[in-house]
Image (tube, rainbow, N blue to C red):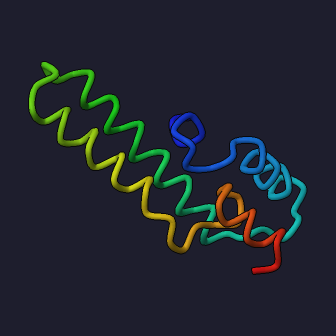
């Protein structure tokens, strides 16, 4: 998963949430949907970059991904930064 590779979310935790959904355990559906949408968007962006010639468009989209990762506001519980805050009680 691209998001896990880039450190956007914790792949094991995401898999645990998906397993809970399979077992019909209550899950955080909105954060899960946002995470899956983000993963899909990053895969499409990667595919698009691979089809391009590697010019300025690829560099610009790489910059957008990096900027998006650095903004840590309103992350779902299965994203590492948010998980640390939950465990610390803050």
- Residue nearest the viewer, comparing 67 with 38: 67
- Residue nearest the viewer, comparing 34 with 66: 66
Determine whether, in the image, residue 3 is placed left or right of residue 66: right
Residue extending farthest to the bottom is 90
Decide: is 49 above or below 11. Answer: above
Q: Position of residue 17 (x, y in %)?
A: 78, 55
Q: Position of residue 33 (x, y in %)?
A: 57, 62
Number of labels in the image equals 0
Decide: is 62 above or below 19. Answer: above
- Residue nearest the viewer, comparing 17 with 89: 89
- At x 51% / y 39%, what residue is drawn? 6
- Residue nearest the viewer, comparing 86 with 42: 86
Q: Position of residue 56 (x, y in %)?
A: 9, 33
Determine whether, in the image, residue 68 is placed left or right of residue 14: left
Q: Position of residue 82 (x, y in %)?
A: 67, 66
- At x 49% / y 46%, what residue is drawn? 39
Decide: is 54 above or below 37. Answer: above
Determine whether, in the image, residue 80 is placed left or right of residue 51: right
Where residue 58 sits, quadrant-wise, is: top left
Which quarter of the image is occupied by the C terminus? Answer: bottom right
Residue extending farthest to the left is 56
Where residue 1 sits, quadrant-wise, is: top right
- At x 88% / y 65%, what residue is drawn? 25
- At x 55% / y 49%, what residue is drawn? 8
Determine whether, in the image, residue 8 is placed left or right of residue 49: right
């Amino acid at each position: 998963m691209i998001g896990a590779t880039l450190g956007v979310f914790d792949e094991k935790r995401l898999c645990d949430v998906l397993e809970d959904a399979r077992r019909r355990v209550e899950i955080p559906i909105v954060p899960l949907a946002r995470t899956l949408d983000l993963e899909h968007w990053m895969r499409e962006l990667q595919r698009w970059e691979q089809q391009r010639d590697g010019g300025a468009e690829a560099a610009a989209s790489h910059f957008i991904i990096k900027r998006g990762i650095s903004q840590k506001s309103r992350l779902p519980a299965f994203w590492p930064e948010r998980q640390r805050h939950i465990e610390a009680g803050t």
